[in-house]
Amino acid sequence: MSSRETNRQTTGNGNRPLAMVTGASTGIGYELAVYCAKEGFDLLVVADQPEIHEAAAQFRNYGVEAEAVEADLATLDGVDKFYQAANGRPVGALLANAGHGLGGAFLDQDFRDVQHVIDTNITGTVYLIQKVGRDMRAQGQGRILITGSIAGFTPGTYNAVYNASKAFIDSFSFALRAELKDSGVTVTCLMPGATETEFFERAGMEDTKIGQSDKDDPVDVAKVGYEAMMNGEGDVVSGFKNKVMTTVASVTPAGVLAEQHRKKAKPGSASD
Ligand SMILES: NC(=O)c1ccc[n+]([C@@H]2O[C@H](COP(=O)([O-])OP(=O)(O)OC[C@H]3O[C@@H](n4cnc5c(N)ncnc54)[C@H](OP(=O)(O)O)[C@@H]3O)[C@@H](O)[C@H]2O)c1
C-alpha cells in the first residue's frame, strides 16, 4: 500500500480524510479545494468574506462534506476559530494558501494595509501551520502545502512587503520540511507565477504591466500544487517560464532584480 493510501485510510472521519484549505473562496485556493474534493477529501475551508459559504456549497457537489468558516486569518482569533472548527478531527492535509498583495510605493501605503499583508501572509499562516503541524506530528502523518510564490525570489519594487512576505514563506517552508523529515509529515511549497485570480485587483495593481500581462490558469497551478503535495515533493514552481525565471533569479544580483520588478509593478506602468 502506498503512503498516500495509508494516509487516506487512517486520517479520516469514517471513510474520508479531512483537508483544511485557507483562502478557498476564490482563485488558487478554490481550485486546490476542488482537487481535494475530487480526490475524496472532506473539506474545512475558510476565507474572510461570506462568499466562502457559496464555495463550500460548490465543493459538496463532488460528494464530500464541506464546512465553511468565515474568519480573518490576519488575527490569531481568526486562526483559532478555523482550527477549532475541525473539532479535533485528524487532518490529512493542510493547504495554507490564503494571502494577498499590496501594490504601490511603500512609503505611500497605509500601514494598516501593510500590517494586514504581514499578518495574513506570515503571522496567521505560520500560527495555523504550527497548530495543525503539531497534531500531524503526533499522529505521525500529514501533508502540508504552503502557497509561497516565485515573488519570494525577487525584491518586489512597488510590491515590497508582499514579495518580502513570500520570501519568508518560501524559506519557512523549506526549513519546516527539513525539521519534519522522518516524522511522516511532508511540507510542500507551491510557488506560482502571475496567475489569473482576484489577486491583482485586490492588491490595486491592475494599472501595472504585470497586472495586465498574460497569466497562468489557477486550475493548472492548483493541479501542480495538489500533485506535488500528494507526492510529498519539497517545492514546485508552476509553469515553464516561471521555472526559467526562478533559475535566472537565483544567479542575478538583487539590485538588478529590483530594477526589473520596478518596470512591471510601477503604478501606471501598464500604459508605458
Ligand atoms: N495570483 C497570483 O499571481 C499569485 C502568484 C503567486 C502566489 N500567489 C498566492 O496564492 C495565494 C492565493 O491567491 P490568489 O491568487 O488565489 O488570490 P485571490 O483570488 O485573491 O484569493 C485569495 C484568497 O485568500 C483569502 N484571504 C485573503 N486574506 C485573507 C484573510 N486575512 N483571512 C482569510 N482569508 C483571506 C481570500 O478570501 P477573502 O476574499 O474572503 O479575503 C481568498 O479566498 C496567495 O497566498 C497569493 O499570495 C498568487
Image (cartoon, helix red, strand yellow):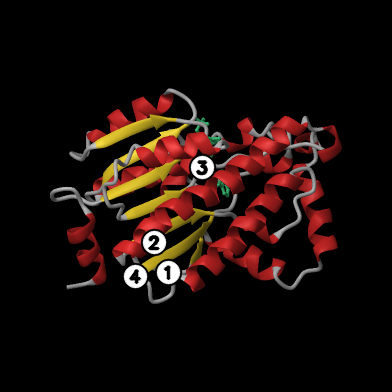
Query: In the rendered image of this protein, does residue 5 appear above or below residue 94?
Result: below
Query: In the rendered image of this protein, does residue 129 appear above or below residue 172?
Result: above
Does the Cβ of the disc 3 residue fall within 8 Å of ligand 1? yes
The residue pinned by badge 2 equals: 229
Q: Residue at x 27, y 36 (%)?
A: 66
Q: Is residue 121 left or right of residue 132?
A: right
Q: Residue at x 56, y 68 (%)?
A: 175
Q: Residue at x 45, y 39 (%)?
A: 80
Label 1's element?
A: loop
The residue pinned by badge 3 equals: 98
- Crowd class of label 1 (few under 14; some 14 to 19; many from 20; radius 10 Å): some
Q: Earlier in the sequence, mark 3 or mark 1?
A: 3
Q: Quadrant of residue 171?
A: bottom right
Does the Cβ of the disc 4 residue fall within 8 Å of ligand 1? no
Q: Verify CB contact (< 8 Å) between mark 1 and mark 4.
A: no
Q: What's under tag 4, amino acid-wise?
A: Gly
Label 4's element?
A: loop
Residue 71 position, x and y percent, is 47, 31
Instruction: Name the disc covering residue 233, or none.
Output: 1
- Crowd class of label 2 (few under 14; some 14 to 19; many from 20; radius 10 Å): many
The residue pinned by badge 4 equals: 184
Q: Verify CB contact (< 8 Å) between mark 3 and mark 1.
A: no
Label 3's element?
A: loop
Residue 126 position, x and y percent, is 54, 52
- Of residue 77 and residue 18, the one placed in the foreground of this image is 77
